[in-house]
Image (cartoon, rainbow, N blue to C red):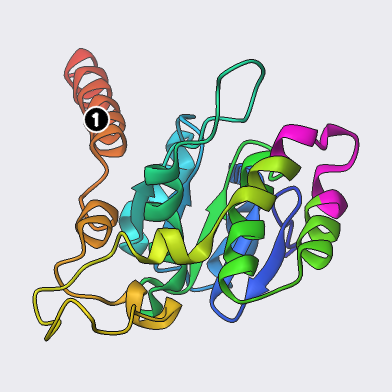
Amino acid sequence: MSLCPPINFALVAPGVYRSGFPTRHNLSFLRTLGLHTLLRLEDEEYPAELLEWIDAAGIRVDDCILTANKEPFVTTDPVELSAALSIMLDGSQHPVLIHSLRGQRRCGVLVACYRKLHRWSLAAAFEEYRRFAGTSSSLLDFQYIELFDPSMVESMFTTSSRESENADPPSADEWAGTPGSSFEKKARTPSHSFDKQRSALSNTQMEHDESIL
């Protein structure tokens, strides 16, 4: 049995993988990962065979659709980015595969921000981004990564159990698991677009079954 990983597949951290959009040709390989979560960064529908595997394996699908940075005024939504980061940092969601269409720019920006949360140097984060984006590398992405401030994102996560306003801000690990976090709730909300796609496929199958009866 041949194992074919998705395009630009790589290990980000223990329990966290990245890649381009998975296809039916990647199913044998994907089964070996024991995935708990698929984190989809582009609004692209899964093929029917992949949906069957997702349902059979009980894999969770979360959509955090990231817009690529473009001139003049289009930038990656920090709310969606933060929701995606919370899933990557949440061990209960692992193993997780984050994927965009080609696993280049959107994945690259997200992973670079994840690296900054883990105190990687900017040079190291840029180098990893370039390795996957190649000739698709964007100066706007580099600027976005450079301006990304982990402390500003962490400050968005609040908890009702904090004893005082002067309490120390949560670490990245605490932030990922903070009960009551607005981004935690967002990240754990079932994916409506995925459910809609699955429902549409089910209806199509029912109509097909009825037509042959």
In this orientation, which residue lies closer to the viewer: 110 or 91? 110
- Considering the whole magenta stretch, tell me its main secondary structure: helix
| Residue under the point 35% across and 73% down | 176
Placement of the C terminus among the 4 image quadrants: top left
Instruction: Locate residue 59, reporting x and y percent.
Output: 35, 60
Q: Which residue lies furthest to the right in this view?
A: 135
Left or right, 116 with reference to 155: right
Whether residue 139 is in magenta: the answer is yes
Instruction: Please name whichever residue, 38 or 121, is drawn nearer the observer in this view of the structure.
Output: 121
Disc 1 marks a residue whose amino acid type is Lys
Q: Is mark 1 on a helix, strand or loop?
A: helix
* Above-or-below relation of 64 to 118: above
Using the image as rendered, state which of residue 26 and residue 195 is in the foreground: 195
The spot of residue 98 in percent (x, y) is 54, 55
Q: Residue 1 in the image: x percent, y percent?
A: 72, 65
Image coordinates for residue 163, horizontal then vertical, percent: 11, 86
Residue under label 1, please give it. Answer: 196
Instruction: Estimate how packed mark 1 is, as few (under 14), some (14 to 19) or many (20 or more) residues with alpha carbons within 10 Å.
Output: few
Which range of residues does the magenta coloring cover?
A: 130-141
When the figure is inspected, residue 140 is found, relative to residue 208, above or below; the finding is below
Was residue 124 drawn as part of the magenta stretch in this picture?
Answer: no
Q: Which residue is drawn at 87% across and 54% down?
A: 131
Query: What residue is rendered at 60% in x and 30% in y?
Result: 68
